Image (cartoon, rainbow, N blue to C red):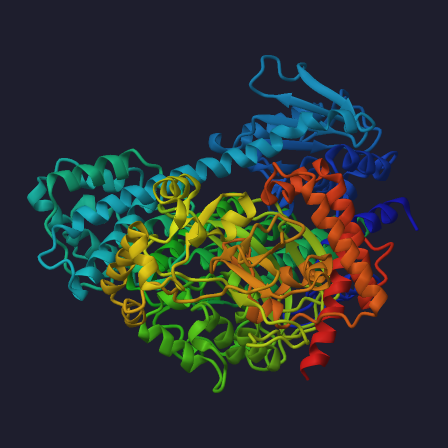
Amino acid sequence: MSVARAAFEACRRFVVAEIFQFRCSSVGTVGTISAMAATRNSKVKSTVEQRLEPADAARSFVATWSGRGYEKGDTASFWIQLLSQVVGLEDVVTAVHFEERVSNGGFIDAHIPSAKTLIEQKALGVNLDKPEMRQGRLVTPFEQAKAYADEMKNSNRPDYIIVSNFSHFRIHDLDRERSAENYVEFSLEELPEQFHLLDFIVTGQKARRAKEQQVSMHAGELVGKLYRNLSAQYIDPESERSRHSLNVLCVRLVFCLFAEDAGLFGKDSLYRYLSGVPTEYVRGKMIELFRVLDTPYDDRDVYISDELSQFPYVNGGLFREEDIEIPQFTEDIVSLLANEISRDTDWSKISPTIFGGVFESTLNPETRAKGGMHYTSPENIHKVIDPLFFDSLKQELELILTDPEMTPLKKTRRLKKYHNKLSSLTFFDPACGSGNFLTETYLSLRRLENRVIGMLAKDSQISLGFENVTPIKVSLGQFYGLEINDFAVSVATTALWIAKLQANIETQELVDQATDDFPLRGAANIHRGNALTKEWSEIINAGDCDYIIGNPPFLGARNQSKEQKAELKAVFPKGTKNVGNIDYVAGWFIKAAQFVGDHKTRIGFVATNSVVQGEQVANIWLPIISLGFHIDFAHDTFRWVNESSDKAHVFCVIVGFSKQKSQKVLYHYPTPDSPPEVQYKQRLNPYLVDAPDAFVWNRKTPICDVPKMVIGSQPIDGGNYLFTDDEFHEFIARDPEARQYFHPWIGSKEFLHGYHRWVLWTGEMSPAELKAHPLIAERVRAVRDFRSQSKRTSTLKLAGTPQRFQVETMPDGKSIVVPKVSSERRRYLPLGMIGPETFASDLVFLVPNASLFLFGVLHSEIHNVWMRAVAGRLKSDYRYSAGVVYNNFVFPEATDKQRKDVEEAAKRVLNARENYKDVTLADMYDPDDEWMYPELFAAHSELDSAVAQCYGFALDGLEHDETEQFILSELLTRHAKKVS
């Protein structure tokens, strides 16, 4: 094998390791690379992708590239590896333009527009100071690159030039005087110590994205202000016709604003068109402009004014509808539109993906809340589309670019085949909102296509310079959307048009050929309708749909309207349990699975984390799994931050599923705000763990012979029976004999954080006793009054027995205490034991008359693994459930000796806590501070081992993740046998 081929193989293996679902030849066909990845990972239960530290990655890079480097064959491989693995540049394949044509006929080896950096690469051994003949003159490598830079448009010219011969790097800062001589140089061997010198490449990318986001957010806010001001000018702004008209008017204005700044209408054309026009004539001028924009050149009035004739025929349906209301403009509106919005904002720099969400957020917040709307940043969109299809598309192109032994003819054929593939893919978002997912997906495909066009243009493999011929094949017609809100439909349509025109600008620069922007042709297929009641086949046939994507609305059961509950019931199969308790988003999961049928479509949705936790899992996923689907990839719980003005924070998951074979990948977030770890799995079940597809239903009784778990007491007292420590002592000071009626009171916070509270129990006091204690009688009367004023029938009934609680749980013996909610960060859910003198609230569960053995099993690692998998969540915290967690847990059948071992170990845990009486359970079990309590966690380790012996589990030698996977797989298997 040649040295070049060996290096390529090393690069290819790195790429393969990244591939989650790679379909080489056509959509729906599992390619050889996917099969290789699956084979590699089938040898282990679960693997975690370990990202090397930059210095370690640099040392690995040096080892790969020392002593080799062929300019033409190795440049792409060299820089893709360096920039992605060492420097940390994102989306290298689309961010770096290799062999980019310049107007003088030359080709730039590599161009990174986001970093304003140009790279001139020479072969190994080439003297970087020696002039070579290039285009009729002797130039050094730097002078050659500088000549390329001088040929570029001012807006595209680089700030940096990097010259390299594989063994040395020179960085020229063009802002420095005598930049040809004043450069920073380091060798390949010095890369592990000097890689930070290339940080400007990443910071440039980040700065560009930050600027794009800032401009887009500001633009969206300005249009939101315009929207509100225009709305106030309508006679009946709440009428359906007026709302629709306002939506159309605003998106037309947005399109015109973009078109004038992008050079499509002429510089400042809209601003100049409105300048100096009296306010009372602006409405008429706008109506006239819209009519012209929708009129073909041949059909225009021959006497049309010059100021109107400059505007092109747009078509695309944007200006076609004439029967819309356009209200009178005010001076404030004209000033806002002409100055702040038109003159002072560069609309060519906006991100249509970000802008769409911000623009749509001008909707009434109550309207968005009722619809469960959550808008989406480009970063979060890529969490869905990257593992679903975009990663594999990038990697396919990377393999084409980096194969050093691929002949130019073969590379051209592969590029053309790949180009055709891009133009054949279809995408459907059945909850498309402002079109964020569709817009970002379209732009991502166009970035890949532009790389292909650039490579083909280099070898003149595309038609250039002929009328009505375009190298662009990716079209808006590949994109389908369904959305219930009329305004959002308008925004989505416009955002996609803007995305197309933005991508055309880059294409035009690549091929030095004007793209045919107007009239607009081939619109996206955005439809208005209710996704849960409309037949999706009316929009696109399942057999023609490659990917279903989106961020459907989240609405918990308590927040759903009667209509929404009815929609869910109609979507789910007959006989599905507990549909009334399922989140609204689940309807899209079910309907997508039903729509796809036996086709090869892949689905990727954002959802609230309740769809993979707690009792909803079985209700949602059993119908989907029964249809033959399986989960391909997922992001477990993370905090979702959007780009709209309300910056909603919700806890989400992402789930990709299909009927296709693929590598299972979990993006695991150690905390909701941390970056994810990439974990490769053999299986990925609906609880997002590597275990069989088992389902845990809510049960009223335990599946094993153990005491029943019950909820704590519920006074319904308006706070009259509950006392802080100070209030308790003040009360006793006034009535010392009342002490006998008080009991310590614990809920989740009291139990975990050591707060002292007391409860007054009057349930067994006689009338004579009440009269003897007037302060207590006063409290009882206050409870009666509180209950009498309630609107709940059950509480009104309780007013007749004010001494009693609504729920009274007061066991005689020892009880295990289990908090309902606990932090997801804790390794162990803290449990406790209380006697009959302590009363517990309904914020904890109790296991009355429980043995120390039962306490030990519940406090073990094995039960905690089970709880983490099947418990529900409150935000990201664990929400324990008697019906799902405890009643479905398979307790071990232990020998007398094993029971005794567990009991002894459980005692050691409780005794170890006594060593830290001044510390709360929350502090003791804080994972950051476990090292402070060595005796406690040593006791826990002994308890874990004792309980594992009861189950017959051999856990020695397993890594933490392997241990969890083994335990959970065993528990689910035993659970399935127990309930069958």
Could you say which is closer to the camera, residue 667 or residue 520?
667
Asked if 851 appears above or below 339 in the picture, the reply is below
Q: Is residue 715 left or right of residue 685?
A: left
Q: Is residue 74 left or right of residue 829?
A: right
Asked if 726 appears above or below 552 in the picture, the reply is above
The quadrant of the rendering that contains the C terminus is bottom right
Rendered residue at 41%/80% (across/down):
569
Residue 449 place in picture, x, y as percent:
57, 54
Could you say which is closer to the camera, residue 229 or residue 264?
229
Residue 559 place in picture, x, y as percent:
36, 65
Q: Is residue 407 visible?
A: no
Could you say which is closer to the camera, residue 163 or residue 673?
673
Which residue is farthest top?
Answer: 177
Could you say which is closer to the camera, residue 247 or residue 893?
893
Rendered residue at 13%/35% (across/down):
276
Q: Is residue 402 left or right of residue 554?
A: right
Residue 193 place in picture, x, y as percent:
77, 25
The image quadrant of residue 385 is bottom right
Asked if 400 appears above or below 275 in the picture, the reply is below
Which residue is farthest bottom?
Answer: 574
Which residue is farthest right?
Answer: 1
Residue 566 place in picture, x, y as percent:
36, 78
The image quadrant of residue 96 is top right
Q: Is residue 594 visible?
A: yes
Count of numbered circles on the image? 0
Q: Is residue 563 left or right of residue 99?
A: left
The image quadrant of residue 882 is bottom right
Rendered residue at 84%/45% (across/down):
7
Rendered residue at 83%/63% (across/down):
949
